[in-house]
Image: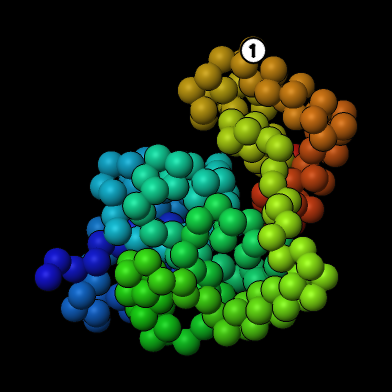
Amino acid sequence: MSPITVLLAEDHLIVREGLRALLKAEADIVVVAESGNGRQTLELTRELKPDVVVMDIAMPLLNGIEATRQILDDLPETKILILSAHSDDAYVEQVMALGAKGYLIKQSAAHVLAEAIRRVHQGKTSLSPVISKRLNHHERKARARGDLHAKKDASHLSSREMEVLQLIAEGKANKETADELGISVKTVEKHRQSLMDKLDIHDTAGLTRYAIATGIIESSVQVTII
């Protein structure tokens, strides 16, 4: 049987090295690539088509939530396993609604990761116990209210707008954003204006605060507000 191919998407090198060393001991799992930002994760996933992408949420250039959305749009057979320091309900609900198969917090025991990779590769769901408990609690409350099947809150921003928003919030100028995305400065300006119109936010500082509040970037990210 072929080993499960894995791509590690994590912006901290020391964490990636630890994950790679951990998985090297597993005979049925092989790490085929590593990435340090969301855009590189997209490129490598499209090129290599790994069985499982182990994805951090907070990554530069493109966050793990948007990377998950774009990967599963292009490669729906790819399994996404989130491994993040963040266990907030907003993060969990967003990525699971997009189609991620698992969500582990980084405080999980080392052996849990390999087993989670095997489970999501089989199409099963794998969640850290604390997350599973919370989701079950929310489900019971929703059933009691009679709105279990209520539509999940979904972003009304396009993938490109989300990309532009993250780069704006990271302090990138229009020219830098255009170069990173391979589009014209004029197109970036149109997306910026569309963001402001849709969100009813009319300055860069407000867009940055929105990006932090919604988890598009971490509050610890160093940004330049102009």
Q: Which residue is mark 1?
A: 186
Image coordinates of residue 102 in percent, x first then y, are 49, 68
Q: Indicate whether 37 appears above or below 184.
A: below
Give the amino acid type for the residue marked by disc 1 in the picture. Answer: Lys
Asked whether 148 or 119 is in front, the reply is 148
Q: Residue furthest left?
A: 1
The image quarter containing residue 80 is bottom left
Please report the residue visible at 33 percent of the width from the left and 67 percent of the height from the top.
Answer: 121
Image coordinates of residue 171 in percent, x first then y, are 69, 37
Is 205 placed left or right of 50 in the picture?
right
Q: Indicate whether 34 appears above or below 163.
A: below
Tally of marks: 1
Is 211 placed left or right of 31 in the picture?
right
Asked whether 107 or 175 is in front, the reply is 107
The image quarter containing residue 74 is top left
Q: Indicate whether 75 appears above or below 157.
A: below
Is 77 placed left or right of 187 in the picture?
left
Quadrant, the N terminus: bottom left
Q: Indicate whether 189 appears above or below 54.
A: above
